[in-house]
Image (spheres, rainbow, N blue to C red):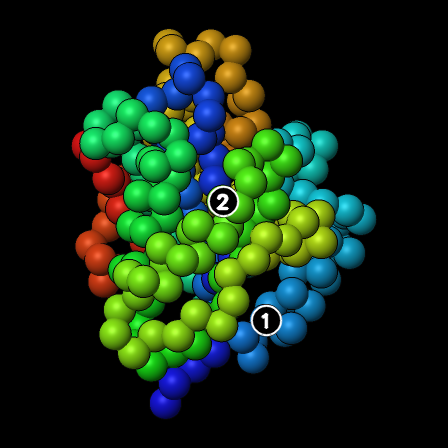
Amino acid sequence: MPNDVNIYCDESRYSNPDDPYLVIGAVKCLRDNKPEIVADLNEIKRQYGIGGEFGWKSASPNKGDFYKAVIDWFVSCDDLLFRCVVVNKGNLWSSDDEDGFYVAYHQLLYHWLVSGNMYHVYLDKKKNSRQRRVDTLRGKTWRSMPSGCELACMEEVESRECALVQVADLLIGCMGYEWNGHTDPNKYPKASSFKVELCEHLAGRLGRPSLRFSTWASERKFNVFAFGE
């Protein structure tokens, strides 16, 4: 039976010249399940006294229990799935950052779409992105979707107004921190010890020794594709 599916996307370390990897990722859920998922997340925020937006940039020790609780909740939530593409920026066949953006998003979305489903795709709105970027991405996605898929919408949303974009931001922030070596004290002795701890917590909950891993395409819960290695 065809499903309506929501996908919430974000990107991490895309423009930092010192980091070799960019990470583009998303969380996905059935559209009908979204209200219950968000209600559960809001209850966690209430329990820990978190009133506003959360994400990777604002992760700090004074909110440590909350961030770990969000990770624990995500791992145990069967209705919410994650996929990311980790891209070696030096090995993209295009030297243009904008082309690289579209290539990475194609890799993220194409292999996550199921024939017969209707998709609603939401991207975190970026202040400095090029004009009509989403229009271009929408057109490229529409033309290259697997047969039988439908794209109901692709639009930008403000992350502060979309809790599931914030979840995606947190997860890809962890992945970017690990893949770009910020968890290595020899390379980054001044890295945030709490963010290192958060990466270790997520890896442990996933049953991994670290977050520097890739998965088979069939991996359902936490799918990682290393592209351009």
Please tell me in which quadrant of the rendered image residue 203 appears: top left
Where is residue 192 shown, x and y percent of the image? 55, 21
Q: Nearer the viewer, mark 2 or mark 1?
A: 2
Give the numbered dot on residue 34. Answer: 1
Look at the image and tell me whether residue 224 can be seen. no
- Distance between the alpha carbons at the discs numbered 2 and 1: 26 Å
Viewer-proximal residue among 42 and 138: 138
Instruction: Please state if 58 lies on the left or on the right of 141 as rendered.
Output: right
x and y percent of residue 123 in the render?
54, 51
At horizontal 50% and vertical 50% (from top left) the residue drawn is 134
- Mark 1 packing: few (<14 Cα in 10 Å), some, or many (20+)? some
Classify residue 144 as left or right of residue 184. left
Which numbered disc, 2 or 1, marks the residue that appears first in the sequence? 1
Question: How many other residues sit within 10 Å of disc 2, few (<14), some (14-19) or many (≥20)?
Answer: few
Report helix, strand or loop for mark 2: helix
Q: Position of residue 147 (x, y in %)?
A: 25, 74
Q: Residue at label 2?
A: 133
Q: Residue at x 57, y 27 (%)?
A: 194
